[in-house]
Image: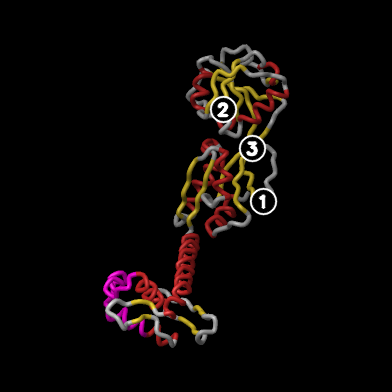
Amino acid sequence: MSSVCAKICLKGMFKEVTLMDTNKLAAFVDLAQTLSYTETAAHRYTTQATISKQIMAFEKELNVQLIDRSHRQISLTWAGQTILPFAREILGSQNAMMAELNRQQKSRNMALTIHSIPSIAQYKAFNLMASFTHAYPKIDLHFAESETPQLLPSLNQGESDVIFTRLFGESKPEYDTAVIDTDRFVVVMPKGDSLADTEKITIDRLRTHHFLMLDETTNLYQPVMTLLTKANIKPKVVYKGERIDLILGMVSQGMGVSIMMAKSLNTADLSGIVTVPLEPGQTSQLVFMRRKDHHTPASDLFWSYIQP
């Protein structure tokens, strides 16, 4: 077991001592609990004789008797009872130290956790992340998709080192931010729609259309609703949910139109739909973000890699 150097001053009862070997502390704390050399020896994977020697050596260092051996049933002396909470505190601090050391060691072992919006595969960020893993194969990458409301909490709570998300112009000065891509709103509509052949479309021309919308768990819902509200449109919502693929399928069947980000769409297998730029245009930024106060060697490497 590792050693720590700890000083215990027991209210002037006896001299200040320096404890170097926490094996003795651990043996004493366990014996104070079991009051049995046999049980403590079993807990410590050693012999009764070794436990007895450790306790006696501990007593010699402290210059007090800790264990009352005058009866068949062992018990703590006043000195043993006095130092017991201090001994427990020292061992607790050692355990905390080892836990923190282990956490830091994992960081040094180059683990990297990235959480992202589900549509990352449609953006440059996905290729950047993939090429990074090839450039640094020893980094242990953990990647997971999350809906937008969960991304910043995962970053703030230390569940992720880096997130990939969408911003609509809002500033996040408390985070490091790397802009990877930009995107803009388009109207997704059936090819047979009367507006499908226009080069661009204003929101007002969609007043009578049925809408298929991404819901509040996504970061597109509020910007789209803001556009509609400003145009004094109360949308006739046929569907509201999280699945882009379902919305595209419904559009291809002529069930309504949707407002989405152009690059987030994969329409290769859907010949029955078209996308028309929405005017006035509104863009978003696709960014990697990390906390300014939480950098690991792995995240530093990744951050350097994604810079233009």
Q: Which residue is mark 3?
A: 182
- Say left or right for 72 vs 26: left
Residue type at numbered disc 3: Thr
Residue 48 placement, left or right of 186: left
Check disc 2 and report its element: helix, strand or loop.
Answer: strand
Few, some or many residues within 10 Å of mark 3 (<14, 14–19, 20+): some
Q: Residue 279's image quarter?
A: top right
Magenta stretch mostly in which secondary structure?
Answer: helix
- Element on which disc 3 rests: strand
**Foreground residue among 233 and 203:** 233
Does label 3 or label 1 sit earlier along the sequence? 1
Is 38 magenta? The answer is: yes
Residue located 45% across and 57% down the image? 138
Q: Give the percent coordinates (x, y) of residue 172.
A: 67, 46
Who comes first in sequence, dot 1 or dot 2? 1
Mark 1: which amino acid? Answer: Glu
Q: Residue 117 versus residue 179: which sits nearer the camera?
A: 117
- Compared with residue 227, is residue 165 higher up or lower down, i.e. above or below? below
Q: Which residues are magenta?
A: 34-56
- Where residue 27 sits in the image (x, y, percent)? 36, 75
Are the residues flagged by discs 1 and 2 in contact, CB closer than 8 Å? no
Mark 3 or mark 2, earlier in chain? 3
**Does the segment drawn in magenta span residue 104?**
no
In the image, what residue occupies the spot 56% across and 43% down?
Answer: 151
Give the Cα separation between the discs numbered 3 and 1: 21 Å
Q: Is residue 161 above or below residue 85?
A: above
Q: Which residue is mark 2?
A: 214
Image quadrant where one finds the N terminus: bottom left
From the image, tell me which residue sits under label 1. 174
User: Hey, what amino acid is under mark 2?
Assistant: Leu
